[in-house]
Image (cartoon, helix red, strand yellow):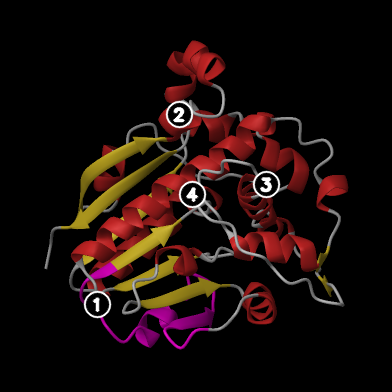
Amino acid sequence: MIKKQKVEKKSMKEKIDLTAVSETMLVPLYARAIESKKENPEFIDNTAVEIIDNLDYNFKKRFKNSTNKMNFWGCSSRTVILDKQTKEFINNNPNGTIINIACGLDDRFSRVDNGQIMWYNIDFEDVINLREKLIVKNERVINIASSALDFEWINKIKNKDNVLIIAEGFLMYLDEQEVSQLFNQISQKFNSVVLLLELMSSWMVKNQKAHDTVRTTGAIFKWGIDDSEDFEKLCPSYKLRANYNLTDQMKKYSPIFIRLISPFLRSRNNRISIFDKTEY
C-alpha cells in the first residue's frame, strides 16, 4: 500500500505568471495532485500536493471548463508508465544519469531515487526559477535554465554514458525539424542513451481543438506521428524497443467506458515509447 505523508503548508503563496506553453505544465501537476489525494491512488506525488496548496493560482477556477476527465486520466496514466520505466532503467543502471527535458514542475526524482543517480532538469528560466522556490533541493539534482533547442545544455551534463532522456508532454509542441535536430544532437553528444518519450498521434494534432489542454491553456500542438517506428525514420540513430499506449493504463479509471471506446481511442491516444541509441 502506498503511504501518504503529511505536507506542511507555507504561510505565503507563490504567485506565478506563465505563457501558454509553460502553463501546460500545470495540467499534469494538477492531475498528479488529484490522484495523490485519492483514497487508493496509483501513486503518491507529495511535491505536487504541496505545490498545488502553495501556489497563488486558482486551479479549480482555471480548469472549471475542463470537463474532459480523460485528460486527467491520461496525465496520471503516463505518470504511472514513466515512473515504472524510469525505475527499470535505474535498476539496470544504478549510477546512471537521467535528464528530464521540459521538466515543468514534475518531481519524478523523489519518486524513483535510489540514492545514487544523477538527475538533470531542463526547462525555460521562468520554470526553473519556480522549481527552485517550490521544490526541495538535492545535491544530485541539477536544474538547468535553457530551451531544449539551445544545445549548450548538453555540455553541462557530466556523464555521457548510461543516460536516460525523458520527454513528457513536450514533443507535441515542437515541429518535425526541431524534433529531428534535438535527438540527432543528443545522439552525437551522448554515448549510450535510452529515450523515454511521450508521442502524440498526428490525428490529435489535426484535431487539437478537441483536446482539453488546448482549450484551457491556448497552447498549440505542432507534431505527432501515428506509428512510433516513424521516429526511427526521422532520427535513424535510434531503434524502438517498446510501446505503451496510455489507453491500457486508463482502463483502471473507467474499465467499461474505456474498453468500449478502446478501438477508437488506441489509434488516437498518446503513447510512451522507448528507444535505444544503436549507432556509436
Q: Nearer the viewer, residue 195 or 91?
A: 91
Between the C-alphas of marks 3 and 4, the distance is: 13 Å
Nearest the eye: 1 or 81: 1
- Identify which amino acid the numbered label 4 is placed on: Thr
Q: Tell me the kind of residue under disc 3.
A: Ile
Q: Closer to us: mark 3 or mark 4?
A: 3
Figure quadrant of the C terminus:
bottom left
For mark 3, does the 10 Å Cα neighbourhood hold few (<14), some (14 to 19), or many (20 or more) residues?
some
Disc 1 and disc 3 in contact, CB within 8 angstroms:
no
Q: Is residue 36 left or right of residue 196?
A: right
Seen from the viewer's position, the closer of residues 206 and 246 is 246
Task: Assign a secondary structure to mark 3.
Answer: helix
Q: Nearer the viewer, mark 2 or mark 1?
A: 1
- Residue 155 position, x and y percent, is 36, 85
Magenta extent: 138-163
In contact (CB < 8 Å): disc 2 and disc 1: no
From what the image shows, is residue 54 above or below residue 201?
below
Position in image of residue 85 (x %, y %)? 32, 52
| Residue 63: image location, x then y, percent | 80, 43
Magenta segment includes 159: yes
Can you identify the residue that label 4 sits on? 79
Please tell me which residue is depicted at 56% across the width and 52% down the height of the picture. 173
* Disc 2 to disc 1, C-alpha distance: 32 Å
Q: Of label 3 and label 4, which has the lower sequence position?
A: 3
Residue that badge 1 annotates? 95
